[in-house]
Structures are given as C-alpha cells and as structure tokens.
Amino acid sequence: MDSTGETLKNLLMAAWLLPLLGFLVEIYALCWTHRLSKAPAYLAVGCIATGFLCSLSALLYWGSETDWAALKPAHHDATHAVAHHEEEHPADALAATQTGGHVKDARETTSENHSSIGVYGGRFYRLAQFGPLEIALDWYIDSLTLVMFTMVTFIATCIHVFAIGYMHDELTEDYQDHEVHLPGGRHFHRPGRFYQFFAYLSLFCFSMLGLVLAGNIFQVFIFWELVGICSYLLIGFYIERQSASTAANKAFIMNRVGDFGFLIGLMILWTSLGTFQFYDASTADGHEQTGLFSMVRGDDGQIALTEDKAAVLLRDSHGHTLMDGETPRTIGYWLLVAAGLGIFAGCIGKSAQFPLQTWLPDAMEGPTPVSALVHSATMVAAGVYLAGRFYPMFLPEVLLVIAYIGCITLFIAATIAIVATDIKRVLAYSTISQLGYMMLGIGVGGWAAGLFHLITHAFFKSLMFLCSGSVIAGCHHEQDMTKMGGLRRKMPVTAYTMLVGVIAIAGLAIPGSQYLFGQPIAFSGYHSKDAIVATALAYSQLNATHILLFVTPLITAGITSFYMFRLWFMTFTGPARDQHVYDHAHENPPVMVAPLVVLSLLAAGCAIGGEAGWLFSLISFSEPVPAHALITSAQAVNLTLPSHHAVHEVHGTAGMLALMAAFLGMGLAYVLYCRPVVNPADIKRQAGGVYDFLVDKWRFDSLYDYLFVKPVHVVARWCQGFDANVLDRLLNGTATVTVSVAHWDRWFDETFVDGLVNLVGRVTNACGESLRVVQTGRLRQYVMWIAVGVVVLFAALFTALPK
Amino acid sequence: MDTVGLNAYLFVAAVLFVCGVVCMAVKRNGIGVLMGVELVLNGANLNLVAFARYTDLGLDGQVMALFVIVLAAAEAAIALAIALNYYNNHLTIDVDRGDDLHG
C-alpha cells in the first residue's frame, strides 16, 4: 500500500511541478532566446504534455493496483443491495444518525467501507507548527484526484497547442493593439508578449494541479489564491485596455469576497478541530492524527450527534469517539454549518455562483485560450472540485444552501445567455449555468453526478471555447454573432467540432435508443446532466417542498439547448450577415484545428456508458460518504438525501423529461434562427421589458454599482475632502511656518555669523595694507633701519634698566 | 705690553664696526655691501679677541672669533653666488634695483 502511494505521489508530483519548472524557465525567455522565438511555447507544451503522461500512467497504475475494483459491476450490485437493505429499515438508519449510541448498528449495515480503498495521503513538508496545530504541504490521492489530474493536464495540453496558433500575432517586436485608442486616433504599440503568455499558462496549470493534489484545506487555500492571481494576470493580459484591466480587477475582487468566507471557515475548523489535513495519519510513535473527514464522518459516513443534538461528536477512523480527557470532543452543530458555509462562500466566488457570478462574463477580456482554460479545467473547476472534496464536512443545511445557490445560478445565467450576442459571452453564461448544475448536483446529494458533470463539461466547454477562438481568429477578432453567419462553409472543421460540443452541452440523445441498446446513444453532456436531473427528481420526491430544485434545472435544460443551438445557427448557418466578415473568414492552420478534433472526440465519448461507464464509476468510487445511506437532519430543516437506488428508479423518467426539454429548445432555436419562421426581432419588440432586463444581466452589475461601488465612491469623496481640507491644510501650515523660520535663520546667519568671520578677515587685511608700505625692497634703507633700531634699542636699554 | 690697553682695541673695533655699517648703508654696489658686512664681522672679532686677552675668559673669545671667520667665509661664498644670480636677472648689481618684492 505504502509503495503504491509513494509511486502515485511521485508521478503526480512530477506532473504538478513540471509546469512550475516551465514557468521559471519561460519567464526568463528573453535571457536565453529572442522575442520572436516559439521555444517558450514548445517548452510549455512539453511540460504539460509530460504532466499528462505522468497523470495518465498514475491513473492506470492506480487502477491496476486496486485491480480496477472501481470498474467492477459487483461494486454497484453491492451498493444497490445495501441500499435496499437500508431502505427497509429507514428508521434504524435515521436513529443511528441522530445519536452516537447506535453508531455501531449503522456500521454493521454498511457492508464495507469503499472509500478507504485506493486512497492515499501523506506529507511533503511541514511549513510551520503552532503547538499541536500544524501547517504543512500534504498530498491526498484518490480516484477523483487522478481523474482531475488527467483531465486538467489533457485539456491544458490541447489549449497550449491551440494557443501556439492563436497567440501567433504576439510573435512580433511591434504589436499594434487595435482596442487601445491613443489621443490623435493612433493605436497603442508594444513589443509582443508571446513568452509571457505561456509562462502564465504554465503557472496557472501548476496552481490548479497543486490545488487538486493538496492534502489539507490550508494548502488548498494557498493554491486557491495562486489560481486567483494567475487568472488575474491572464484576464488582464491586454493590460493596456481599460476593459481588460477592469475585468481583471473585478475577477480578483469578487474572488476576495468569497475568500473572506473561506478564511472564516478555515479559522472555525482550525480552532474547533485542530487540524487541516484530509487523510488519517499515524506517526511512528503511534500517535494518530485523525483527518477532517474521519473526524466528522467516522468510519461509516454518518454524522454522530450528541444527545441534545446541539453538537457533532468527533470520531477517529475506527468510529471511536475522540476523547479530551473524560469528555468527548465535539464541535457545535451550527459552528460546523458556519464552517461549511464559509468554505462554500469561497467556492461561490471561484466558481462564479450567484451572487458573485458577475466577474466571469467580464473575464472574456482575456485571450480566448485563457477563457477556455478558466472555464473548463482550472479556476471555476476549482470551486466545484473543493465543494466535492469537502462534501463530508457539509451538513444538510449547507447542502440545501448549495443546492439553492446552484439552482438560482443555473437559471439566471441561462436566461442571460439567451440574449447575449457576443459569442464568448454566450459561452461564459453557459459555463456559469453548467457550474450551477454541478453545485445543484452536489447539493442534492448527487456527489458523483456533480463531479461527473464537472469532467464532461470541462471537455465540451474547452472544445467550444477553442472553437469560438478559432472563429474569432478566422474572422479577424470579430466576436459579435450578429455579424457572422454561414461560416460553416468557410471553416467546416470548426463548425462541426463545435456542433459536437453544442449537442453535448444541450444533452441531446437519440430517442428510444436506450430501449434498443440498453444504453442511450448520446454525447457526454447528456449522461452527466441526466445524472444531475435524476438526482434532483429523486430528491424532490423525498422532499416535496423543494420541488423547485427539480423543475428549474429541467426548464433550464431546455433553455441551455435553445441558446447553444442559437449560437451555432447564428454563427455557422444561414446567410452571411456581414459580407465583409464573411469574405475574409478562413479556416485556421492545423495547429489550431487539431486540438478541436481531439477534444471533440473526447467531448463526444468520454462519458460513454453513462452511469455504468468507466468515468462515472471511477469518480463515484471515491464518493466520500456512502450516499446510499439516508441522511436526515433533525435541525432547522428536514431533509432526506436520495439513495443511489432511488436515483436509479427515477432515471428513466428524468432522462425522458430532460431530453424532451432539450429537443424543445433545439426546435425553438431552429425555427427562430435557422429557418426563420418567426422573426426574433418581433419577439424582442413584444417582450421589450424582459429583453432589456436580460440584456442588462438581471441588473446585477447596476445593483452592485448602487450597493457597493457608489457608496465606496461617496466614502472616497469624503476621504478626499478630509485630505484636501484638513490634512493638506495642516501640512501647508507646517510648511509655511518652516519657510518663515528658515528665512529668519538665514538673516541671522548672514548678519551675525558671517559678519563676525568677515570682521576678522577685514581687520587682518587692514593690518597687512598698512604694513605693506614698510616693505620698500631697498636694502640700504633696511640696513639703516637696523642700525637706527639697534641704537634706539641700546638707548632704551640704558635709560630703562637700572645701573 | 701695558702701553696698549683694552680701550684702544675697543676703539678700533668700534671704528671698524661703524665703517662697516656706513658702508652697508651707503654703498649701492652689492659687492661693496658685502665688504661692509666683512668689516662689521671683523669689528666684532676684534672685540671678542680683545676681551679674551684682557679678561680671564681663557680661549673662549678666540674660538668664537675663529667660528665667525669660518662663517664669514661661508657667507661670502653664498653671498657671491647670490650676487651672480642677481646680476643674471638684473644685468647690474645695484642693490637699489632689487625692489621687485616691495609692498
């Protein structure tokens, strides 16, 4: 076991640190190569591609070491059997969750603890120690880590390759930025920053991989911030553009708001639980350090409450209650809720959930490969990943909040995407919407469904962003869809790979195919979205008050299909709306098209087999809490999370409904934008108010402007007034006094000090002047003076001295 | 020997001294001035030797006189060199013309 963990650690560490090495070499590119060299790009691709190979071999090694237990159907049968068993005695399980006394019964009903197989954790390096509290760099590897590593490195490799083509115009000594207007109608000129772009991309990948590999929540926070700063650097890559620097600031500040909650969560966990690490560790001297997950969930995945239900008992990995002397260690129930909400606040900021979703569309200011990376593999994926990783710590109340936040987000973003005309903004809002789906999935207990969607979404969204990048590059940086149209004929590869992504995100499948083949024939998005909708349906059946959590995603599935097909129809079909753009459009070189083809294959096929397929099985193998167990909260809300079996039962219904919604949306887009039976402009005119409301993005930006930006401006003006009227006057007064003192001092110096010195000089001078006449230079006169002097001297001596 | 007393020597010495001083004061020729200096020194020597002879000072006076003679010789050598240089610069040895450094 240990050697397996070591090997996995070394492989993933190589994949993690290679981009950092790349970054360090690339950032000094001008020292070892010239500005026009493509070497930094090749180095970056080499690093991340090697990282991908390491990650993939780690995944395969992990699989062979666990005998591919994750993929064996027996696992599922066992799960279902247990689920059946538990549903027969829901009361027992319910009681077990509520009181610590019956924990043992609950453990017996759970046949085996899957989550402990194939999970490895350890420590790289201890950074600091404060008494018993430690801050360290740890690693934690389970199938989720491995799948994330493989996905991130693979997509990043594709994006790096694409970026070599896309960023080609930066390979110049004199880059002309057409978006920056200088006075006099000129454009801004600067040297190209090709190498810098790849250095930042490498750092971005390093940060994201570090976040995924992190073995404690503090380390997650470190890389969380690194991801934030990298996105800042890349969104603001065209920093000279006002819009880009504002967008970069906005992204950074919005994330700070979420991170404030994250910090509060960290503090609660540290003070109450005394550790950050995820895994259970035992030192050589037999001292056991229980990880966060085991503390709260014990060995059976249940939360053990104290008798009065006001606190959660902390347990070790064997299910024994941790003792602090005589009293058992506990954490207040609502304190744990607050910690969970705090951590989730960080996820809200990072994954652009309501109400912090406004930064993500603005992040479109960065180059398109950055958008692709931010929207699929890194940044926003980090929030969902953390919500998934931290799932064992979330109490039912927190899960409810997560579900509703996700639900609100997915609806708001989808409606805004309907009216957006910027091709990248449509995709940005669809990302927010899909992230909402993931959060909803996690919130309603579909842990694996949410993360399944994270992986599939990463593939098709990176594909679609690179396609949009290809369109933008092919149309010479035209992003407005109202000026496109008919591009299918000009760039066929881009168009049809994009269509794969659109079908995948819309969740289309061949109707009836599941009855013919046992499995629906569909692209990846169908399977993952289906899993979430099915979980939501099962959830709403168990908790009738939360029916909205099922209806909203179902409707939004239709909206998603509508706006994605609207995008595709507007861009690639129909007549050319702008002849100039159409005439100059062209397909891109192979270096940009090849990643699209590769990604489209994965976007189509990565989820093959749906929930019986390898990807879902791999992810659900690390499901931290056996979700087949009923979890009922006895606190503020009364919730029952659906079991796997319950989800499975409604799967057909949910899939059918979602498919109908998707086809409806596609049909609507077809009649509106492809075969314009109905003119969209008429609808726009008739629903003017709603249209304006959506174009204004539900007025969130205006609201935040009034709520936060304007008051800050007012306060700033006050501060400015205080500065100008009080501080400046004080300073000016001091300065005036100083000047007058200096004047007086100068007068004193000049009059008295200088006068004294001058007087000495003048007296000496006068003496010299008066004595110079004696010095005649006549020798004979001197002799006479000497003689006379001697005579006078003698005379004086003889008269003065006594005889 | 008693016929010539100390006063006679002192008188001669005083005459020599005054002659020297006057010579220094009135001569415009640089060599003449040097001669005046020699007269002054010899006047002083005569005093030294006379006092040595007529008092009980022993040989001190004579020794002193010998030193003065040696010094006078050295002084004459340097003074003549100065005079030559003076001549080189002024094409004369008139000491009244050497007032370049007057105040």
Image: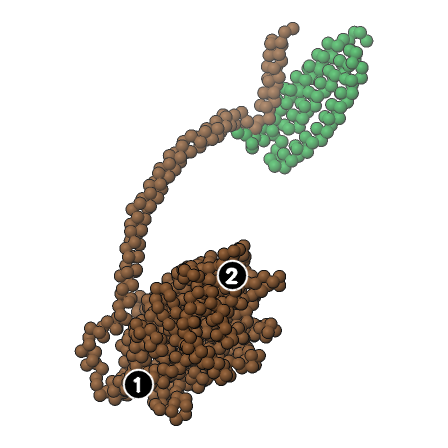
Chain colours: A brown, B green
* Secondary structure found at label 2: loop
Residue A675 in the image, given as x and y percentages of width and height: 25, 89
Amino acid type shown at disc 1: Met
Q: Position of residue A670 (x, y in %)?
A: 27, 87
The label shown at residue A322 is 2
Amino acid at pointer 2: Leu
Q: Nearer the viewer, residue A508 or A249?
A: A508
Please state if A267 lies on the left or on the right of A137 as rendered.
left
Question: Residue B65 vs residue A359: left or right?
Answer: right
Q: Which of the image's four quarters has the N terminus of chain A? A: bottom right
Task: List the single residue furthest toward the bottom.
Answer: A516
Instruction: Kindly indicate whether the residues beneath marks 2 and 1 are on one polypeptide chain.
Output: yes
Quarter that holds the C terminus of chain A: top right
How far across and down, in percent of the image, does residue A422 sit?
A: 31, 76
Residue tagged by mark 1?
A660
Chain for disc number 2: A
Seen at 73% across and 26% down, the residue is B71
Q: Quadrant of residue A415?
A: bottom left
Which residue is rendered at x = 35% and y = 41% of the image?
A: A734
Secondary structure type for disc 1: helix
Name the spot of residue A715 as percent of width and height, x first.
30, 54
Q: Residue at x 29, y 63 (%)?
A: A704
State left or right for residue A753 relative to residue A21: left
Does residue A61 sit above or below A759 in this rendering?
A: below
| Neighbours of disc 1 within 10 Å: few (<14), some (14-19), many (20+) | some
Look at 54% across and 75% down and name the residue there: A118
Chain bearing tag 1 is A
* Camera sees residue A711: yes
